[in-house]
Image: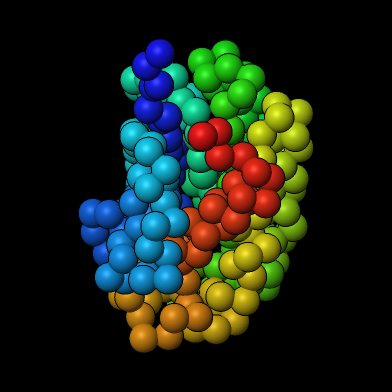
Amino acid sequence: MEIMQPVYVALGDSMSIDVYAGGPGRGAASLLHRNRDGDFPDWAGRDLRSLGYAAQNLTRDGATTTEVLRSQLPQIQARPDLVTLSMGGNDLMAAYGDTAAARLVVTEVAERTERILDTLRAMAGPEAVIVVTTVYDPSDGTGVLPAGGLPAWPDGPAVLADLNTVLTEAARRHGALTADVHAHFHGHGAATGDPAQPDPRPVNRDLWFCGVIEPNAWGAHEIRSVWWRTLREHDQFPR
């Protein structure tokens, strides 16, 4: 009997893409599929490619939950065995600084997340592993990004917490895992450096951001590590 190659599909936004981490192969989704042994030698062999997975990366800079639902999902070419989702942050950024509008956005994200996960389950089946990613906070809970060109938003961290609660609860209802990137990244933004700095590989490897809200090379590696650990802790590699 022929054994089909398992398929990994990456959906979502710039938390997963290569661009801000330094180019092709360096983003979180790329690293999860194929480690860059020269950059992260301790991770040699700890990737999906080593486990036989093919990959389809549909993530895009600036993607919102609407794009994931309407554009990315229809592009899936084969039934996925494993899916990572990073989404919601761009929806929230569109209402940055306006707490009332942002809370409405969280409600809208909740509705679209249900539709996204319903669709994924229908496409992939009950045995597929879906990993929903919480959204990080470059202000490290302060709502202040002094060098980012954005005004302070004291309510921002609380609204972001609401967004992450929506994502986590939706994941639970749909039998998906939650990768808590938000918790893992705490203390690696404004508390340790300038998240607005442009270098994808800053000397300070404790700073995981660039361009205010993007993961640099070290951040991309850390997102990948949270996904990997989440899968391992739940014994959820399908093959």
Q: Is residue 180 visible?
A: yes
**Image location of residue 108, percent across then percent down:** 64, 31
Residue drawn at point x = 75 percent, y = 45 percent: 165
Q: Looking at this view, is 237 or 105 the one in front?
A: 237
Residue 28 can be seen, yes or no: no
Query: Quadrant location of residue 142?
Result: bottom right
Task: Identify the residue at image location x=40%, y=13%.
Answer: 1
Residue beneath the point at 51% across and 15% down: 123
- Expressed as whole percent of the image width and height from the top left, the position of residue 138 reads 55, 68
Drawn side of residue 48 relative to residue 131, left or right: left
Viewer-side residue, 52 vs 189? 52
Choose top left, top right, bottom left or bottom right for residue 211. bottom left
- Indicate whether 1 appears above or below 131: above
Q: Tell whether 200 sits left or right of 85.
A: left
| 20 vs 64: above or below | below
Q: Name above or below for residue 9 compared with residue 118.
A: below
Q: Say which of 188 and 231 sits in front.
A: 231
